[in-house]
Amino acid sequence: MFSGVLNIYKPKGYTSHDIVNKVRRIAGMKKVGHTGTLDPMAEGVLPVCLGKATRIAEYLTGEEKEYIAEVTLGAETDTLDAEGEIIRECSVPEISEDMLQEVLKTFVGDLVQIPPMYSAIKRDGKPLYKYAREGLDFELPGRDISIYYIDLISFEGIIFKIRVGCSKGTYIRSLARDLGVKLGSCGHLSSLIRSKSGNFNITNAVTLETLQEEGVEKYLISIDEAIPQFTSVKLNEENSKKASLGNFVLLEDEEYNELVNSDMIKIFAFDGSLIAIGTLKERVLKPKKVFV
């Protein structure tokens, strides 16, 4: 049974769950999960966890994302992307590149964003897209998000392409809608590529075809490598045994070595193997997810 993370390149036309099912078949195992949904229209980076690595999925999901997005002005769709039905057409005023750059700047920072009705966000335990398919519509509460940067890649006529760095929970479809409004028109997302998800980059993402031909093991990223942002601590033999059982550990001087309090600690055994991830506060190490 494999344990680790695969940096999968998701093609257009597949759901994230479709990719998980395909990886299950290729790897010959059931314990597989993805770390952040990509819409069927979107392509790009989709980290997929296998085996014990499914226990770190929550840490990977919360990481910063980067997207290459194409926005088309003049029409808004019910899904806010090119796969939806056009619900509104608008005139497009004359827009210069300088004007577009200035508008893009206003979306950088901490924002409150209204999510799309066609989304997996749940209301009363039911995904919003199910309400939308039933023809129901209601005012949605805004969600706090952060956009770290927006770079203009190209601009021609009513279509422009941007690179966006953002926090978990950001809907690029909603950003496309809001940009259209701010530019005095309306708009929708016409293509989307996720180029980064945390430490996973599109340049070394593997396709399903390559995975099928060459096998999983060659492309498997260890749990340790998948979370390089975590602080590491190596325990002596006695404390290694305690931590492997999920027990609290009071660090010795040579283990503590001026570590700072953190909720993200990789705990290694005396032999160098990864035991668990946990938290550290005032020398007390608490294993949270044990891998042995």
Image (cartoon, rainbow, N blue to C red):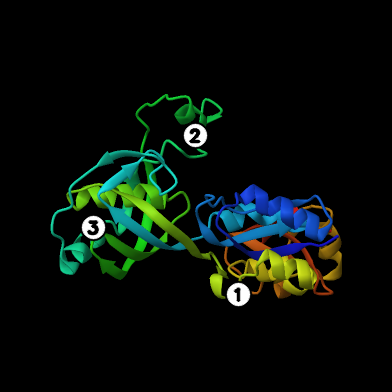
Which label was assigned to residue 247?
Answer: none
Q: Nearer the viewer, mark 1 or mark 3?
A: 1
Q: Earlier in the sequence, mark 2 or mark 3?
A: 3
Disc 1 residue type? Answer: Asn
Q: Is residue 251 visible?
A: no
- In this picture, residue 220 sits left or right of residue 200: right
Q: CA distance from mark 2 to mark 1?
A: 33 Å
Q: Nearer the viewer, mark 2 or mark 3?
A: 2
Give the camera-side residue of 87 and 193. Answer: 87
Disc 3 residue type? Answer: Thr
Check contact, mark 2 vs mark 3: CB within 8 A. no
Image position, residue 98 (x, y; %): 16, 68
Label 1 secondary element:
helix
State the residue position of label 2: 129
Residue 47 quadrant: bottom right
Which residue extends farthest left?
A: 94
The quarter of the image holding the N terminus is bottom right
Q: Earlier in the sequence, mark 2 or mark 1?
A: 2
Q: CA distance from mark 2 to mark 3?
A: 29 Å
State the residue position of label 3: 106
The quarter of the image holding the C terminus is bottom right
Crowd band around label 3 with a 10 angstrom C-alpha radius: few (<14), some (14–19), many (20+) = few
Give the camera-side residue of 122 and 203. Answer: 203
Residue in view at x 56 percent, y 28 percent: 125
Image position, residue 213 (x, y; %): 77, 71
Residue in view at x 73 percent, y 55 percent: 22
- In this picture, residue 84 sits left or right of residue 150: right
Disc 2 residue type? Answer: Tyr
